[in-house]
């Protein structure tokens, strides 16, 4: 039988003391003292729905599923379209959510050529040493949390079997992750990597990660026949967890936050062959590489890491000059179907990771830069157009009916921290979503 691990009473007491002296960050980096009696929420439950495009709530795809539970949160709270991060790949975007820092700081990067290892990378779990996640921050300040398949903080503040910063990976679909949240709210043990962890009390923060919608969109785009039912299933999990919070007697002291890592755009028309043809016209040696684990030929001068919604271009050898970067950007920008070619200056302004190549190319929907040419409708992300996500906050400490503007994923960790009455992660660059919070 699996070992049962429990929280220590001393740790719970420390958490209570910490709440009395915690401070919440204000815009501009200033801080103000708060106490347990003025803390807006006792618990925060966050749903992070991979690939949940904001247009499922407002816009072109809003009629695909009714989603009554999510819309009830919207009606009782605040919502809007938030800024994601660039490039809009899952791990990099989720690292921004977890740290409150931009990719230029946490340096988690997607779909690029790692020039230190000379190998292509699709997605990674990297977070720059010294950049603090919300899991590390909450634990340091004596608060408890459970991260249900929210993989970004695994071994970055949360681990299997740790009752204070619990990582649980049940696999399966959104229902299996919601099952674990319901158990935690009922005070029942949960399986954490083979260790049964028996919570002494409900965690201060519970994050629920679901990737059901993202998988459907990648395979079939917005016309996938199973998409409406998938959206309805995700919505039902919000209702299940909310009802469990009600049964636990904490609903009026709980804030619900629903967001995503990126939006999605459809693609059917291949554009990579024309990009390669134009690049070959430069007289430089061009090589297109798959996005994971490939090594370029030593003679390659233009290395292209191809993905549907971005192509990362690294210049090497004689190609690696500012003049060639400008020339190649002009050539690619002239191709019909190209939305943008982002150079080093653009990437700095977007606060993107410095591990990206010299240029990043983005196509217009429905063009794509993958090597597939079958014309089947699919969905993907990575470009700036997909760096928009829904942001919904509702419940304890949240205003009602106020439009949420000028917020981003970088603001999630500071806002959760403020709701719980603690400092944000020490390296956070985002700000508290003051427009969402009730004024005390």
Image (cartoon, helix red, strand yellow):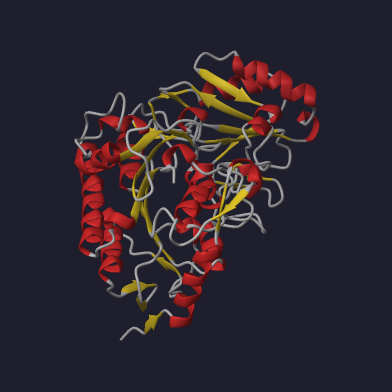
Q: Quadrant of residue 112?
A: top right
Q: Quadrant of residue 378?
A: top left
x, y percentage for residue 197?
A: 36, 77
Reply above or below: 159 against 116: below
302 lies left or right of 198 = right
Reply above or below: 214 against 406: below
76 lies left or right of 279 = left
Total residue callouts: 0
x, y percentage for residue 128?
A: 65, 54
Can you see residue 99?
Answer: yes
x, y percentage for residue 66?
A: 19, 35
Q: Quadrant of residue 260?
A: top left
x, y percentage for residue 232?
A: 20, 43
What is the quadrant of the N terminus in the image? bottom left
Reply above or below: 224 against 141: above
Say which residue appears at 59% left-offset and 25% top-offset. 276
* Residue 372 vs residue 391, the one in the foreground: 391
* Residue 381 vs residue 70, the one in the foreground: 70
Say which residue appears at 24% left-offset and 45% top-offset. 235
Can you see residue 210?
Answer: no
* Residue 95 vs residue 240, the one in the foreground: 240
Say which residue appears at 36% left-offset and 29% top-offset. 374
Say which residue appears at 48% left-offset and 40% top-offset. 434
102 lies left or right of 50 = right
């Amino acid at each position: 039988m699996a070992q049962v691990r429990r929280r220590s009473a001393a740790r719970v007491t420390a958490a209570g003391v910490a709440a009395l002296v915690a401070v919440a960050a204000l815009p501009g980096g200033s801080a103000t003292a708060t106490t347990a009696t003025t803390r807006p929420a006792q618990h925060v439950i966050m749903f992070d729905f991979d690939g949940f495009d904001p247009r499922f709530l407002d816009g072109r795809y809003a009629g695909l599923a009714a989603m009554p539970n999510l819309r009830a949160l919207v009606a009782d709270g605040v919502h809007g379209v938030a800024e994601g991060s660039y490039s809009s790949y899952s791990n990099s975007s989720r690292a921004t959510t977890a740290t409150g820092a931009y990719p230029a700081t946490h340096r988690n990067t997607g779909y690029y050529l790692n020039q230190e290892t000379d190998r292509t990378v699709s997605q990674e779990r990297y977070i720059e040493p010294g950049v603090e996640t919300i899991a590390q921050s909450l634990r340091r300040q004596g608060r408890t949390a459970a991260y249900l398949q929210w993989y970004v903080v695994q071994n970055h503040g949360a681990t299997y079997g740790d009752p204070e910063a619990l990582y649980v990976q049940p696999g399966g679909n959104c229902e299996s992750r919601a099952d674990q949240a319901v158990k935690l709210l009922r005070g029942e043990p949960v399986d954490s990597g083979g260790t049964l962890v028996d919570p002494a009390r409900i965690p201060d923060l519970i994050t629920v990660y679901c990737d059901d919608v993202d998988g459907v969109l990648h395979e079939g785009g917005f016309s996938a026949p199973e998409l409406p039912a998938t959206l309805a299933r995700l919505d039902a999990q919000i209702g299940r967890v909310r009802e469990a919070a009600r049964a636990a007697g904490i609903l009026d002291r709980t804030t619900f936050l629903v967001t995503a890592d990126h939006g999605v755009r459809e693609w059917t028309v291949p554009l990579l062959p024309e990009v390669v043809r134009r690049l070959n016209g430069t007289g430089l040696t061009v090589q297109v590489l798959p996005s994971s684990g490939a090594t370029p030929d030593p003679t390659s001068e233009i290395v292209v890491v191809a993905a549907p919604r971005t192509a990362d271009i690294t210049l090497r050898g004689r190609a690696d000059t500012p003049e060639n970067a400008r020339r190649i950007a002009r050539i690619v920008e002239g191709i019909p179907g190209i939305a943008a070619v982002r150079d080093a200056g653009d990437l700095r302004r977007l606060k993107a990771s410095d591990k990206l190549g010299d240029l990043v190319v983005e196509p217009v929907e429905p063009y794509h830069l993958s090597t597939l040419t079958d014309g089947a409708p699919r969905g993907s992300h990575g470009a700036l157009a997909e760096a928009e996500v829904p942001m919904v906050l509702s419940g304890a400490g949240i205003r009602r009916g106020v439009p949420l503007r000028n917020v981003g994923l970088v603001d999630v960790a500071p806002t959760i921290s403020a709701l719980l009455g603690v400092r944000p992660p020490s390296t956070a660059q985002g700000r508290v979503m003051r427009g969402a919070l009730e004024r005390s």
